[in-house]
Image (cartoon, helix red, strand yellow):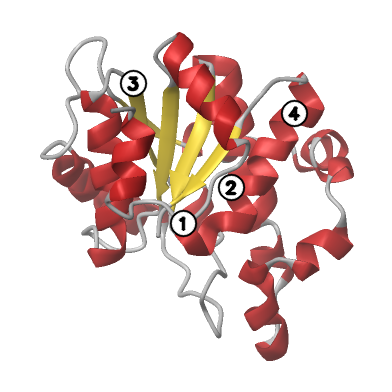
Amino acid sequence: MHVLDTLKERGFFAQVTFEEDLYMAMEREPMTFYAGFDPTADSLHIGHCIPVYAMAHLQQAGHRPIALCGGGTAMVGDPSGKTELRQLLTKENIANNIKSIQKQLAHFLDFGEGKAIMLNNGDWLLDLNYVDFLREIGALFSVNRMLAAECYKRRLEAGLTFLEFNYMLMQSYDFLCLFKRYNCRLQLGGDDQWSNILAGADLIRRKEREEAFALPAS
């Protein structure tokens, strides 16, 4: 049985982009994929279970996981599902949380040589030149489409800060960086991340003219 059929049978994902193309791409060769974990606490929570289990299934089927800790995105805070601005963490808090989360992920994924990869998006996000980033990435995003995304709708009612508004661009840029560096073509995540994941896959198609896929969990 194809690993995507296994995930679907077990209810591990809610929707998928270009499903037939993804099936064929995974049959041609092992696929590098990733899921992001913003270190807003010193432990994973129940909402991470399905994406982590899905990563484990995909790895067992011969595909390569990237566990991306959000040392950069945690400095901004994901507005998805929130009615108010997340508490802003210090760099020290974030670094300690990352260490704890990395230890937990090692119980589910094999990080041996040539296996899963553990990365921190702070390595490329924290030193970005903001004007260059806006010209290269921001110019490709429609504000109208962003405001229609589910991750922003709820926050708009309470007041969406410009700080949080940057989150989708940053997560999309993560996907683009991982594609360029590791040929990562698939992003997993919670269903609340659908708009952000879709934006990242679309950014790769627009910038690189290559296939990229979104697979949010149920």
| Pointer 1 local density, CA inside 10 Å: few below 14, some 14–19, many at least 20 | few
Q: In this view, does 154 lie above or below 76?
A: below
Residue 143 in which image quadrant: bottom right
Cα gap from disc 3 to disc 4, whole angstroms:
21 Å
Relative image position of residue 118 (x, y in whole percent): 32, 30
Instruction: Give the residue type at disc 4.
Output: Arg
**Residue at horizontal 26 percent and vertical 26 percent from the top:** 59
| First of labels 2, 4 by sequence position | 2
Closer to us: 210 or 176: 210
Numbered disc 4: secondary structure = helix
Residue mark closest to the camera, 3 vs 2 = 3
Residue mark closest to the camera, 2 vs 1 = 1
Relative image position of residue 195 (x, y in whole percent): 64, 57
Query: Dot 2 corresponds to which residue?
Result: 197
Query: Dot 1 corresponds to which residue?
Result: 14
- The answer to the question of whether label 2 and label 4 lie on touching residues, with beta carbons closer than 8 A, is no
| Left or right of 40 in this view: 97 | left
